[in-house]
Amino acid sequence: MTYQIVVANTGNVDLTNVTVTDIRIENLTGPDESLNENRVLETGENWIYIGTYTVTLEDIINNVVNGFIENTATVECDHLDPRSDSVRVPIGGKGGEGGVIPEEKPDCTIDKTVIDVAGKGPAGTVTASGEIITYQIVVTNTGNFYLTGISVTDSLIQDLNGPEESLITDGVLEQGESWVYTGYYMVTEEDIISSGEEDGFIVNTATVECDLLGPRSDSAAVLIEEEQIPIKLEYCISKSVIGVDEAGDCIINEPGDIISYQIVVENEGNVDLTGVEVNDSLIQTLDGPVESLYDDSVLGIGENWTYTGCYMVTLEDIETNGHGDGCIENIATVVCDQLDAVSDSAEVPIGEVPIDEYPDYAIEKTVTDVGGKGPAETITQAGDIISYKIVVENEGYVDLTGIKVNDSLIQILDGPVESLNNDSVLGIGENWTYTGCYTVTLEDIETNGHGDGCIENIATVVCDQLDTVSDSAEVPIGEEPTQVITEYCISKLITGIDEAGDRKINEAGDIIEYQIVVKNEGNVDLTGVSVSDPMITLTGPIGDDVDSGMLNPGESWKFFGNYTVTQEDISSNGEGDGFIENTATVTCNELPEENSSIKQPILLGSEDEKDNADTQHHGNGGTGSARVVSKSVKDIEVSENKEENDTVNDTGTQIKTSTEIQSETDNEDVKQNKESIESDVEKKQEEKQEGNRSVPGFEIVYCVVGLLAAIFLYKRK
């Protein structure tokens, strides 16, 4: 007689030192481990043993017990008490008491279990879409008749692996035999959003059918626990002395000595802070802030603002010895809309060298962006780019040399940007800023950040004077919805006016040089980007450096083109308004078209025309602006914003003497500019009219001059 013994782990703890014994069979074959050949009966795993017993003459003569041969198997392990199971085989005829053939009772069971959830084990929970749940299905013949036509289906898994037949691979589920199936299910976004159809679980049901029995089913459920990022409101202020009587003996010992301070406010939470104000107990007017990320009056996540100021020591400070404590104490306080006030102070002793000769520094690493979604977002897929900022600050009173910064994930860092002097020395109170990017790998996603659910990155600084100091930043791995921003702008400007001639537009053949800039101001790639200009043939783009043919977020493309003035332009005086107007239009697959226009005046020698020679510009939807610039500012970035001085050259065209061009203005700025131009023109015309009234017979002289000018122009043509 051949027996099969199946031992299954139905709990949630792995079992060790598992042994199986049989009262009639000394040498069992097995076990055949269904999951891993590691001698550990893992959660959801089953082991199969096979053994043969030869009936003896004594068994037949004695008829054993009540006409049956009974056999018992027992399993033991480290964690549980022994468990046993028996089976009886009848003696005589075809079995049964008195040789009666037993009734055929076909039956089977199906057992479905979860054996892993996203690498977190069978007891793990689902936290994000894309996670993999691994199932095992075991079908066992528990009747006394073989079963055929076995079919197993699963409500979530289309293609199951198996079966693995424990006895004979013949497509027949023998008495006591078990078939094992495995399968995988990938969690969907819909599962997360609907929270498992609102019951908080992903429920999966397996069903077995055969020729002799009706369907039998079993289910397994996995809990959904969506990870939440807690809101953290926090900032800090740091005040330090960066100079003491530097023009004198570096000691506070007389009225008029100057103490220089630096104040740094940093957002250490994950929420932007507004209404940030810094006050100082000794300094009425601080310089700053210098905003480290965006000049938008918002203290963004991970951003720091730097203020500076000076205090002049008074006679009272010296005579009272710092009001009795021997030092000058200064307190800086920061407050914002979201948090209570926080303060920090700095002290400078009077009458002695105030700075001890000891070195100290600190390193701080922060995340500035995750996949273009901001610093507080989570990793969702391989290929996401994490941007980091590393700030090293000299907090001691000794200059530091030989500064080296290394990063555990980024081989080459950008920087440093030295805040005081670009001399490769980290001066007292100075900070150096480094930046770098890390591209998330498939291994990061599959291992869930090597098991801890986040990507950790460590930056380390070392110098000649001090030991190594490190700081780390973590980005959680998970999937959360991100707001999609689709936006772009176009700006058109003139970069050259008749450069080969008199730099005036006054005759056919003069050339106007244009530059057009298109920028993606959203967080979505733009495709099918096309720029057209009805008057010129454009070259470009320049700046398509990331994905060819795709305008990536934050990317700017430049186009160039020249227009040759025609005789018709001169003869019609720009179709009557005295300007040559040119409009550029940008289109893409994702957004409606935007355009930007610019006007170049035609100068025919009239003083009135010269007075009205400011270049006019406009655009639709506030998408851009344009100004005529001198040759010295050609091909610069139009996104910078610096102080300008207007002058009028000999062409009558308004130009900017600075090396920057402001481009990001809205419709209201353009309107105000236009109104200002019109007001200046009207004012000049009124002044000329007043002057004309003061000269007797001016009308006659004016008519004669006009007639002579007309005759001159006619002969010239």
Image (cartoon, rainbow, N blue to C red):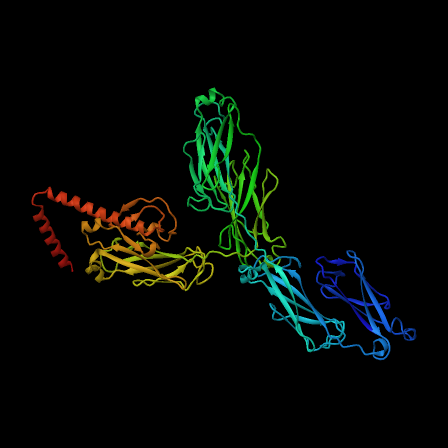
**Residue 356 seen in render:** yes
Q: Quadrant of residue 174?
A: bottom right
Residue lying farthest to the top in this orientation: 319
**Residue 410 seen in render:** no
Q: Is residue 634 left or right of residue 80?
A: left
- Residue 529: percent from left, percent from top: 40, 62
- Residue 259: percent from left, percent from top: 46, 29
Question: Up-down: is 671 above or below 310?
Answer: below
Q: Is residue 85 left or right of residue 189?
A: right
Foreground: 279 or 226? 226
Foreground: 578 or 152? 152
- Residue 415: percent from left, percent from top: 51, 47
Task: Tell me the quadrant of the picture where the C terminus can be found.
Answer: bottom left
Question: Up-down: is 510 above or below 28?
Answer: above
Foreground: 250 or 30? 30
Question: Up-down: is 464 above or below 524?
Answer: above
Task: Tell me the quadrant of the picture where the N terminus can be found.
Answer: bottom right
Total numbered circles:
0
Residue lying farthest to the bottom in this orientation: 93
Q: Residue at x 47, y 21 (%)?
A: 318
